[in-house]
Amino acid sequence: MADQQFEPKIVGFLCRWCSYTGADLAGTSRMQYPPTLTGIRVMCSGRVDPTFVVKALKEGADGVLIAGCHPGDCHYSEGNYKAMRRHPMLANLLEQFGIERGRVRLEWISASEGELFAEVVTDFTEQLQELGPLNWNQRIEADCETV
Amino acid sequence: MISLTIDGQVVEVEDGSTVLQAARKLEIQIPTLCTHKALLPYGACRVCLVEIEGSRGSWLETSCTFPAQEGLVVNTTSDRVLRTRKIVLELMLARCPEVEVVKELAAEMGLEDTRFPKKGEDCILCGLCVRVCGEKMNAGAVHFVNRGTGKAVEPPYDRHSAVCMACGACEVVCPTGCVDLSKITTHQPRPIPSEFDEGLSSRGSIYVPFAQAVPNTPVIDKDTCIRLLNGDCGACQAFCEADAIDYDQEDTIEEVDVGAVIVATGFKLFDSKLINRYGYGKFDNVLSAMEFERISHASGPTLGKVIMKDGRSPQAVAILHCIGSRDENYHEHCSRVCCMYSLKFAHLVKEKTDAEVYNLYIDMRAFGKGYEEFYKRVLGEGVHFIRGKAADVTDVSETPEEKGKLIVVAEDTLLGVTRRLPVDMVILSGALTPSPDSADVGRVFSLGCSQGGFFLERHPKLAPVDSMSDGIFLAGACQGPKDIPDSVAQGAAAAAGALSLIDKGKVVIEPITAEIIEDRCAGCQLCIANCPYAAIEYDKEKNISVVTEELCKGCGTCVAGCPSGAAHQKNFEDEQIFSEIEGILTGSEV
Amino acid sequence: MAKPKVAFYWCASCGGCEETIVDLAEDILGVVEAVDIALWPVAIDMKRKDVEAWEPGDVAVAFINGAVRLSEQKEWVELLREKCSLVIAFGSCAHMGGIPGLANATNREEIFANKYHRSPTVANPDGIVPQEQTNVDGYDLELPTFWKDVKPLNEVIDVDYYLPGCPPPFDLVATAVGAILEGKLPPKGSVIAPEKALCDTCERNDTKPDEMTITEFKRTATSTPDPEKCFLADGFLCMGPATRSGCGERCINGNMPCRGCFGPTPDAIDPGLKLLAAIASRGEADSEEDAKALADSLVDPLGTYYRFGLPASMLKRSADTERAQT
């Protein structure tokens, strides 16, 4: 299997108004990008609770993408700013736990940016390939003893 | 009440009235030069003479000062009156032969010239300036000096007066226009610029903002009105017959309950000063589009004459398109209306002057109904079109032809050459930009902004009039640059949208609203500011935060940001998302 | 009727929980009147064989404080589980792992390396590390196994109730004991504390501004909080909004922000992540750089959010426990 490239699993939290539509556009425009990301539609990137991100990582995702409208363009005015402020705080916390910052990514993708969506997924996939599998249990729970 | 007879007509007036007032009540014209409604009668000019008939013969009186009395008989057109008035005017014409108001009045009396030696003065010594300054402004900065032939109006000791507030009332009341404020005051006289005329003309402290203002009512400028500043003046009150002027009126905040709101807050014209190289604010004859709009308008400061600052008619005019728009350094958007108004300007300049007109454009965008046709018409009028954005406006001439001109430098991209156009006037067709306070307005109405900063419509094609908040509609340039027909259409659509919403009597809300479980909420209030719709309120009595479901749009930001998990998003619960995550990752190696 | 018997036991803890009972002073006589203390290592000399001799159900309640890290602790708590009708996890350590649980931020090897080699106060030229099996003077000795991680009590044995706090305040203990004596027991697995977060009872909650914004995180070590103002509004990270009330605001009254010893409210999946989301939302940062700067101003986020609950946190608990809980 050495020659087979590791295919990361990415969970994407996509805001319903911009990024989810952007992802749709990437599809309808027949853009090519790795089939690594599965999107979960949320109403707003501000709805993305950090527990969702940790949950996804614990359940086997190698990376999590949070994508919302560009700052200033949020359908709900400023939900994306909340996402923007949470992201580094979560990344700092996860880093202290030994999870690389590069595994949780925040992007602004508008409804018209199908191409950007494809680029982001491609780039994120490559980034995760470099980081390798997350293996949450082995990494985080390796030190746990089963009783 | 007193009753008296003037020219055979009986009139009743109030006690304390003058004969002049009684005559005016009968609409009998008596010429005056020194009366002013707001000032006390003075009798300086003597042109208002009338003949009073008494039991022992008749005599002449100045009607502006003579009190009306019971049974008085007055004649305003007797030979004696007319003869004497003519002499008075002849003497006045001798003193001030070039003063327009005197010349007119003299001509009315059939006087062509004066028999007396002419003195060439321009002050008729009516004393209006002296009285307004003393009576109304309580300043007394000017007064009569000397007597007889040496009589004149001057500040004390003929020195610039420090008590003068430079209010300009003397200038305003002077019938001959001979007051030069700069010779009176130690202050810098500052005319109040007219906002509507883009500062190209001045206005009074009480003014109607512009001709079609709604409501068409005068307003008092608190910052310049002497009455409101220090309690003096109050002259306007004397003129208002409806007695509608109330200096004690305060600004009030009206609260109105409404079912829908139409936001139509418009745009701001790009401030061309931001681009130094076009010389706006530096050269007199570099104008913004709005300034030219006023200049070219029949009711504008030049009464529609296209003239330069020095009053000359321009020989060549350059109109520069896309100032601040389609420009990565300022605004990337196309302002849509500039091409067409630039064509209109070109047409107006051609119509009103013999000037050569140059349009410097990036692309001509004549997209609307009849617009292309208008473009062709303007082309046919001999307007020059140069494809290329102007690079620079300078007054540094390189050739004798350029001397004293403004030189517009631009690359003509069709010819592939750099051109220097010597012109007299430059009009900058500035971008339509979002109002500077649009972020604040947006916050009040929970409106988002699109990339350029204009308010974001719900959907660019399917809901171009709705905002993201139900019941709040957008109309006009606040949503994006647009011309008058488009603004009218959007305004009408917004009105219809608002009406249909109100008419329905009920609103439909999203089923994914947030909910705060009362028993679990600790009232930490961290969610409240998270809500862009102000849908969460703090119930002080219960010490909990409460979601007003009707206002909630279901973004779920408060749910994610609830530290105790008391907030839920209905039909979009954490558990549902967790299940989705588990579903997606089923079979993953962890 | 014989008085019901109670047992106290301690695992990985500081002894502070025992202090709660010792702090009763003369009031302990009242307790002794109501119950018989069958086991209390801090005060009564009892051996394991004495406890082994009990019949199951002999003892009504076991109050166990401290987290579990040693095999010996496991044996003890299993023994008490067998012999006692009810097991109550007493205090933050038994409840969520507590301060000893912060050890889970690192691993056993690192801890031993620090303790026996790297620490500047250690002189250990031979590099001796305690071994589970040793022979001293011909005797085979056994030390308990030092586990790879610290566990809250419920990951080792079945726990009936939780009494949170570091240490649990006595009024809460009294309520719990009263409920047990009267047989008015809440559903099994309950945390015996109010369900609302601390802001509910915090006096400073009224001082929260309408629109709170956090520009940077201050530390109590380097600046003093305004004694009248909501800590969060003052820029100090306070766990109050994500932590159960019932503690009597002991820290708040001492002008210290809440540190979270009472654990999360019942609906919060993870107090650290929930509070992170809440306060980040109120951060004042309109660009990604500003947001990063704000995040970086919080020193040691892990230790701050999970001072008392790392082993029970979403990050450390197993995915299976996780599923069971949600």
Image (spheres, coloured by chain):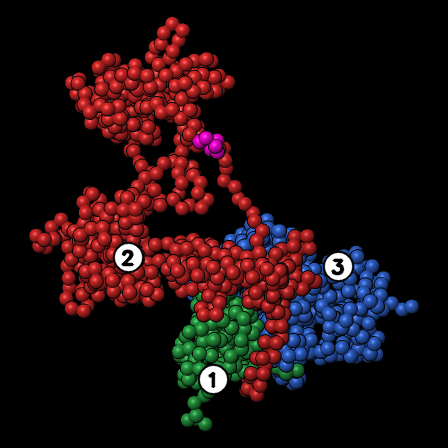
Inter-mark Cα distance, 3 to 1: 54 Å
Q: Which is closer to the viewer, label 3 or label 2? A: 2
Residue picked out by circle 1: A36
Looking at this view, is B312 or C222 the one in front? B312
Looking at this view, is B283 or A115 the one in front? B283
Residue picked out by circle 2: B344
Q: Residue furthest left?
A: B400
Give the residue drawn at x 42%, y 77%: A114
Neighbours of disc 1 within 10 Å: few (<14), some (14-19), many (20+): some
Tags 2 and 1 both on a single chain:
no
Tags 3 and 1 both on a single chain:
no
Q: Amino acid at mark 2?
A: Lys
Q: Which chain is red?
A: B
Residue picked out by circle 3: C171
- The chain carrying label 1 is A
Q: What shade has chain A been given?
A: green
Q: Are marks 3 and 1 in contact (CB under 8 Å)?
A: no
Q: Is residue B261 left or right of residue B576?
A: left
Q: Which residues are magenta?
A: B240-245
Inter-mark Cα distance, 2 to 1: 57 Å
Q: Is residue A100 left or right of residue B527?
A: left
Does dot 1 land on a helix, a strand or a loop?
Answer: loop
